[in-house]
Image (cartoon, rainbow, N blue to C red):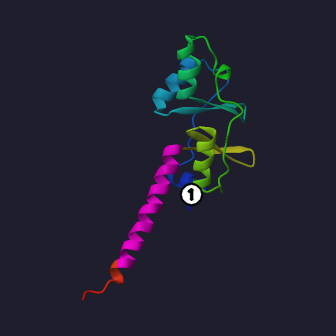
């Protein structure tokens, strides 16, 4: 089973961050520009939350509030749920499912080193299953005798 570290090695460690004081509208613009569904909220060098499309939809739009006035700190998911890099993909998916999140910051020794999405983890799991299926098919075909 692959680890979160292996996924980060393949996808890269690029993260998009904003400050807690960023206006929600500006954060949404960053998300649109970078084509991401969540931004990590950092105060100095400390991860303090995650701001996602889901936060916006449920805590701004549906409540009739203004994204041009509200700050990210008012609606971000905090404290942030994170994962460590040597955790397996399977455990990462279990955490995402249990906590109902789609984005997990990756922290190592209190330092932010990347982010993984549910899509990253599902892709990894599918790729591993394809390899296992391929090996099993080859094994079965090599052990089948024609009579």
The N terminus, quarter of image: bottom right
In the image, 65: left or right of 140? right
Figure check: 126 above or below 138: above
- Label 1: state its secondary structure: helix
Tell me, yes or no, if residue 114 can be seen here. no
In the image, 129: left or right of 77? left
Q: In the image, which residues are magenta?
A: 118-140
Figure check: 39 above or below 94: above
Figure check: 131 above or below 10: below
Tell me, yes or no, if residue 59 can be seen here. yes
Q: Position of residue 90 (x, y in %)?
A: 58, 55
Asked if the magenta segment contains residue 85, the reply would be: no
- Name the residue tied to disc 1: 6
In the image, 94: left or right of 129? right
Residue at x 60%, y 17% (from the top left corner): 23
| Foreground of the two, 136 or 75 | 136
Residue at x 49%, y 34% (from the top left corner): 36
Q: Position of residue 104 (x, y in %)?
A: 61, 42
| Foreground of the two, 136 or 131 | 136
In which quadrant of the rendered view does residue 45 lie? top right
Residue at x 46%, y 27% (from the top left corner): 32
Q: Position of residue 116 (x, y in %)?
A: 56, 45
Asked if the magenta segment contains residue 124, the reply would be: yes
């Amino acid at each position: 089973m692959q680890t979160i570290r292996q996924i980060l090695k393949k996808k890269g460690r690029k993260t998009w961050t904003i400050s807690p004081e960023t206006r929600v509208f500006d954060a949404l613009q960053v998300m649109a520009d970078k084509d991401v569904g969540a931004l990590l909220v950092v105060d100095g060098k400390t991860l303090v939350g995650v701001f996602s499309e889901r936060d916006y939809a449920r805590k701004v739009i549906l409540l009739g509030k203004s994204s041009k006035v509200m700050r990210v700190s008012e609606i971000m998911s905090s404290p942030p749920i994170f994962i460590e890099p040597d955790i397996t993909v399977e455990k990462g998916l279990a955490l995402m499912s249990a906590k109902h999140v789609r984005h997990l910051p990756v922290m190592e020794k209190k330092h932010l080193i990347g982010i993984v999405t549910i899509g990253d983890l599902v892709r990894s799991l599918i790729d591993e299953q394809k390899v296992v299926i391929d090996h099993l098919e080859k094994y079965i075909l090599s052990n089948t005798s024609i009579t």
